[in-house]
């Protein structure tokens, strides 16, 4: 690109020499540049649209391929290999068709540009020869003039090529627009106040939330409750009632549309997200493991944590025994996204990760959903020890895991429908009672 711009600068020098030799011929050469420029400008929207479609088709094809490879066991179990293959081939065909369409458009533009160059070359040769015959131009001057033409036209054609590449870059930037335009959580020029070491007092003060201003319905509405340090609160309800959204607000992943969330009287909207999350332990619904060792996944590559600390939290998470039975123990590679481990094993590693660093607030979002009955029973036995001196939030569909909570919130359509202990809610015979009847056979 730098060489091209240097050639453009020199082009003006060459044009000056051409004007010196013969200004009529020079105007003829410059006149051929106009249709090339017009052609480039007119073709730009079409090139950009085709590039956009090519990116779209390629992304869809790659996404489907990754999805197929990740779900190969499900595909085989359903004996759907052929149907899935046909679906992928359709996607690949769509991508190739768009590539061919883009190539045909580029070839067409190249052919038109070549035609313009050939016509202009013919006209230049005829007019230049006429000037030589009329003795208005010497043969030497005409030869020199033709040599200079190449020096002038070549940078212009290079700029046209760069313009085509620029259209592809614009499409790539468009696809990254959501990422590039996302506002940072914290302004580095005006950093937020770091959250001091917390005791674990949590208060939701009339919190309402919706994911977008265009959403008519709130995901959470008028949520107010308070949790004292060291207490365990369970959040239950039907799917889609807003349970996971509530704890995402507590982590500062989203901010309330209205209302406040206070931790030890600090509004989390006004504290540094990193200082907040470093004091939270979170086990999400979907446990993500990186392609490293088990120890690296527990510590998340933080050098301040030792093997002994990793073993300690693994024991609390009921993960130590199965890790010890692996050939390399804590140095065993888990594979891509933990593919070498079962769902229950991945979940236990995620629980151990959440306990590392002794967080004062622990969030368990369906933390035992992938555990077998025996592992869940042992984890429940450990939970009292794990929760000691920690404020613990438990989100669960299995009500057997929340019976011993200090308080239970029952969410329904984004509202707190009921609250109380297990025995109190059972006595009310409301929504919680009916959920318990279905699960606990009471």
Image (spheres, rainbow, N blue to C red):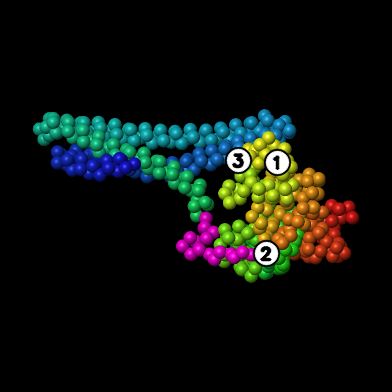
> For residue 323, which numbered disc appears in the image?
1
**Secondary structure category for the residue under label 2:** loop
In the rendered image, the residue lying farthest to the left is 135
Q: How would you rate the neighbour count of disc 3 (Cα within 10 Å): few for under 14, some for 14-19, many for 20 or more?
A: some
Q: Is residue 31 magenta?
A: no
In the rendered image, the residue lying farthest to the front is 308
Q: Compared with residue 16, is residue 229 higher up or lower down, i.e. above or below? A: below
In the foreground, 95 or 396: 396
Q: Compared with residue 300, is residue 100 higher up or lower down, i.e. above or below? A: above
In the foreground, 141 or 317: 317
Q: How would you rate the neighbour count of disc 2 (Cα within 10 Å): few for under 14, some for 14-19, many for 20 or more?
A: many
User: Which mark is first along the chain, 1 or 3?
Assistant: 3
State the separation of the CA atoms marked 3 and 1: 16 Å
Q: How would you rate the neighbour count of disc 1 (Cα within 10 Å): few for under 14, some for 14-19, many for 20 or more?
A: many
Q: Quadrant of residue 16?
A: top left
Image depth: mark 1 or mark 2 in front: 1
Residue under the point 77% across and 57% down: 384
User: Which mark is first along the chain, 2 or 1?
Assistant: 2
Magenta part of the protein: which range? Answer: 182-199
Residue under the point 74% across and 42% down: 321
Question: Which residue is under mark 3?
Answer: 291
How far across and down, in percent of the image, does residue 352 sit? 68, 49
């Amino acid at each position: 690109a730098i060489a091209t711009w240097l050639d453009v600068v020199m082009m003006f020098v060459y044009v000056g020499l051409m004007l010196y030799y013969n200004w009529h011929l020079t105007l003829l050469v410059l006149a051929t540049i106009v249709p090339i420029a017009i052609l480039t400008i007119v073709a730009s929207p079409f090139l950009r649209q085709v590039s956009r479609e090519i990116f779209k088709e390629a992304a869809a094809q790659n996404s489907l391929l990754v999805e197929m490879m990740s779900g190969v066991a499900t595909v085989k179990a359903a004996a759907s290999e052929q149907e899935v293959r046909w679906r992928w081939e359709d996607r690949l065909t769509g991508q190739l068709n768009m590539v061919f369409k883009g190539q045909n458009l580029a070839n067409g533009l190249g052919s038109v540009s070549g035609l313009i160059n050939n016509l202009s070359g013919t006209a230049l040769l005829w007019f230049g020869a006429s000037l030589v015959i009329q003795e208005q131009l010497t043969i030497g001057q005409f030869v020199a003039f033709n040599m200079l033409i190449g020096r002038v036209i070549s940078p212009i054609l290079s700029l046209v090529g760069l313009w085509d590449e620029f259209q592809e870059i614009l499409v790539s930037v468009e696809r990254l627009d959501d990422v590039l335009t996302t506002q940072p959580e914290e302004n580095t020029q005006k950093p937020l106040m770091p959250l001091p070491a917390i005791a674990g007092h949590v208060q939701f003060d009339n919190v309402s939330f919706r994911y977008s201003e265009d959403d008519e319905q709130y995901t959470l509405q008028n949520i107010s409750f308070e949790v004292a340090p060291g207490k365990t609160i369970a959040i239950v309800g039907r799917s889609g009632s807003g349970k996971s959204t509530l704890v995402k607000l507590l982590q500062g992943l989203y901010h309330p549309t209205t209302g406040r969330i206070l931790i030890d009287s600090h509004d989390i909207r006004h504290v540094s997200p990193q200082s907040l999350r470093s004091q939270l332990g979170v086990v999400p619904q979907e446990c993500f493991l990186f392609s490293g060792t088990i120890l690296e996944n527990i510590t998340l590559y933080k050098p301040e944590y030792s093997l002994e600390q990793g073993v300690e939290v693994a024991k609390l998470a009921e993960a130590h025994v199965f890790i010890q039975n692996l050939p390399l123990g804590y140095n065993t590679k888990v594979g891509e996204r933990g593919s070498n481990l079962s769902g229950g094993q991945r979940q236990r590693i995620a629980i151990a990760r959440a306990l590392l660093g002794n967080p004062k607030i622990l969030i368990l979002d369906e933390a035992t959903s992938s555990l077998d009955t025996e592992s869940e029973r042992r984890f429940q036995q450990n939970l009292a020890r794990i929760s000691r001196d920690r404020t613990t939030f438990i989100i669960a569909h299995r009500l057997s895991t929340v019976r011993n909570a200090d308080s239970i919130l029952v969410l329904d359509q984004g509202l707190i429908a009921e609250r109380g202990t297990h025995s109190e809610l059972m006595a009310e015979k409301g929504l919680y009672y009916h959920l318990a009847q279905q699960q606990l056979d009471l």
